[in-house]
Image: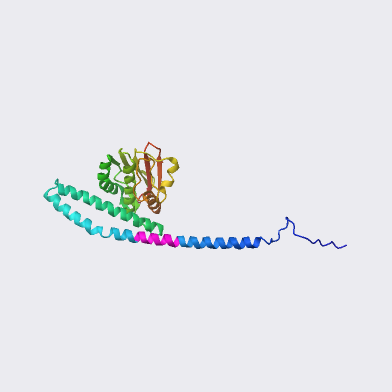
Amino acid sequence: MAAARVSGPVTSGSTGPRADDIPASAEAAEETAALRREVAALRRALAERDAFLAGVAHELRNPMTPILGQVERLLGTAAREAPEGRVAQGLVQLRWLVERYVRRATTLLDVSRAQTGQLALLAAPVPLAEVVEEVVASLSPMAAHAGSTIAVAVPDDLVLSCERLALDQILDNLVTNAIKYGDGGAITVAAVREGGVARIRVSDRGIGIAEADQARIFERFERAVGDPRVAPTGFGVGLWLVRRLAEAMGGGVALDSRPGEGATFTVTLPLHG
């Protein structure tokens, strides 16, 4: 006997389509398309912002080159005629201010290049001690104003395989942070050789950074402020740029810190040869 055909409504256990599934699927597809359009618009806006920042940084930095050259010439004349005079001292301070301005503009430009994937770094032999000496000398007025001293312990025979300007940017950002958040204490810049790499440590004895914030501060627009009495300054991109530059040169950066016990940033970069 043939089996009887059962007619009636589809049961809840059926895998067939339901009438109310069709509008829901159409609605989901429309929401997905709207989200994709919004994401595309946001990406265009970010690209336009980065292009704008790059243009602004370029326009801000370029006029300062001849100004810095003129300051250098005036300083040379003043140093010959009255090296200890007020004019020479004022020009030294002016040179420092102009150099700091150029560095800030360069940071903006590097951030824009990093975001657009245009941050091309060319490795070459770079004497670490020489760059550290230049950075520390340029930041000594800032450190003196904060009441901090900077001690250097970097062997002369450490030659890195990196881009000199990128190394300068890394050290400048780390030492500047140590001065800002070092609470007027001693700062140390040291380096050691470990196999085929150099480990560069910048340490301060300041307010420190809570463990919960130690990953966050390497992101863009974040600041290493752990004390509400310390007003945040700068763009909040310094440590993010340090990480990006170090990684682009085959290295990395790490942090060891506790609130009230200071902070030590360790940058690892490959040695030449």
Q: Where is residue 167 in the image (x, y as percent from the top left)?
A: 33, 51
* Viewer-proximal residue among 63 and 35: 35
User: Going 29% across and 58% down the picture, which residue do you hit?
Assistant: 60
Q: Where is residue 15 in the image (x, y as percent from the top left)?
A: 71, 58
Q: Position of residue 8 (x, y in %)?
A: 78, 60
Q: Is residue 32 above or below residue 151?
A: below
Magenta stretch holds residue 206: no
Q: In this rendering, would 237 be left or right of 8?
A: left
Most extreme residue toward the left, as rendered?
Answer: 81
Q: Position of residue 124 (x, y in %)?
A: 33, 55
Most extreme residue toward the right, as rendered?
Answer: 1
Magenta stretch holds residue 52: yes
Q: Give the range drawn in magenta.
A: 43-54
Q: Is residue 203 above or below residue 54?
A: above
Q: In this rendering, would 85 be left or right of 162?
A: left
Q: In this view, does 171 lie above or below 109?
A: above
User: Residue 128, can we see it?
Assistant: yes
User: Going 31% across and 40% down the picture, which residue do you hit?
Assistant: 187
State which quadrant residue 105 falls in: bottom left
User: Going 46% across and 62% down the picture, which residue do you hit?
Assistant: 41
